[in-house]
Image (cartoon, rainbow, N blue to C red):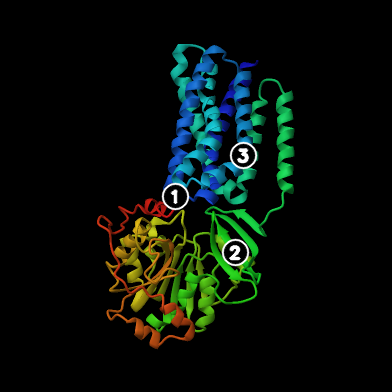
Amino acid sequence: MNEKYKNQSLNAIIFVSGAAVMILELIGSRILAPYLGTSIFVWASLIGIILGSLSLGYYLGGQISEKNPQLSILAKILFFGGISILLITLIKQPVLNFAMAQGVKFGSISATLLLFALPSVILGMVSPYAIRLKIENIQGSGEVAGNLYALSTLGSIAGTFLAGFYLIPAFGSTQILFGLSLILILSSLLSGKFKLKIAALVFIGLVWLIFQTIPSPYIFETDSAYNHIRVADKFYGTDKIPIRILYLATETHSIIYKNSPNLFSKYEQFYLLDNLFQPQIKKALTLGGGAYVAPVNFLSRYPEAEMTVVEIDPKVTEVAKKYFQLADDPRLKIYHQDGRLFLNQNKTTYDIIYGDAFASYYSIPFQLTTEETVEKIYQSLSDNGILVLNLISSLSGEKSIFFQAEYLTLKQFFPQIYIFPAHYYDGTNTEKSQNIVIIASKNQSRLTKQELLDKSSDIQKELVSHLWTNEIKIDAGVKILTDEFAPVDYYISKLL
């Protein structure tokens, strides 16, 4: 083989394999997210197991290269790497269902092992094998190894930016896997026998076509830079009431009645209590838009008020406009930004702030839970302003640690805190997880349950009856959440 062609082929192979490793790792997070979330446990499993698999691949690649250093063998390694990635598309559904049943910690480990270990091992074999093919004598070995590892790293950098800034926002996870498999098999055509590889390419095309014919149970499904987004129409209850559901990652995020403006979700109904604690509402802020159910309801309840919504994902807003009830309104301002970043830069004062960024069992933005964030929220509220915060937890027991820590954090600033469990509010089943709505007020005077009932509408009376009047018990060792210490993923894992 021409030496120049061989060197160019090796350079291309090294670059492509470096890019493939990082694309595989990033797309791995998107594949696991709908079933296991995006917590630190998922990322630790992905990074740790893929690094371990690459290490094994480096070892095996070095051993094999000493026995039979041929470009055709390296081409076969690429070929089988492409096949192993194609295999992910065929087995990921049963593997993810199995992993989900094991919980976040063990599920993340098992899913990563079963889906991504084999292709990572194979891709790890490429670099040491390519180095062996390029080394002609011991004198130039250091330079050759350095150049190839630099090229592989450049490929990894290119793959990282390509996946993060273009592929994941533009294509579905399965499409990216098909593309990655295709590129590796095409790269393997640089050397070796072609018949099997051409047959594999035809097989990939056939499998891809089959995937396109499988009907989706959703009326809309896509990946964005932040979420796996799905919209489904279903029927609720024995009366078969039509509803529409927004799924973000693995969880139901928002539900609306298709034929009624009434609020479906119980926790969102507690937002109707806002004027009992803050009668003068002119400006409001919502952290976390979702399907914009609560902001739309707010604008209908307060025709003279303004609402600002901070939603990190522009694609979620697009979906809310197309499939839910969100419409352009001069009284509605939308910022596509991280909620903490918005608060850090905020100069506006609001009468009420709604926090709906914690409605998850799997992944909570810890930076919105901390003492520093609560201080920013407190400073952004008017004199008698209130924070209405929704979170999922229990009132006691191991599953209540996040609730306890957040309650303790809020108490550092707000003189009055009211707790409204959505379901278990009679003193029983306190260890069960549920939506808990917290209303934190800057008002120094505390309203009694009777005072709240006296000025409640009929709808509000039933909601006020949920007010938790028992003592909030804080377990020994529970600490205030800070930017320095906020093990929220660990606390949330207790719920699972």
3D distance between C-alphas at marks 1 and 3: 23 Å
Other-residue count near label 2 (Cα within 10 Å), few / some / many at <14 / 14–19 / ≥20: many
Q: Reply above or below: 153 against 420.
A: above
Task: Name the mark nearer the viewer: 1 or 3.
Answer: 3
User: Which amino acid type is marked by label 1?
Assistant: Ser
The image quarter in which residue 481 lies? bottom left
How would you rate the neighbour count of disc 1 (Cα within 10 Å): few for under 14, some for 14-19, many for 20 or more? Answer: many
Left or right of residue 410, residue 464 in this image = right
- Residue matched to label 2: 245
- Which SS class for mark 3? helix
Residue 451 visible? The answer is yes
Crowdedness near tag 3: few (<14), some (14–19) or many (≥20) residues, C-alpha within 10 Å: few
- Residue positioned 65% across, 26% down in the render: 188
Q: Mark 3 highlights which residue?
A: 91
Q: Examine the rendering and report whether any part of residue 278 can be seen.
A: no
Q: Which mark is residue 39?
A: 1
Q: Residue at the spot x=73%, y=28% of the render?
A: 198
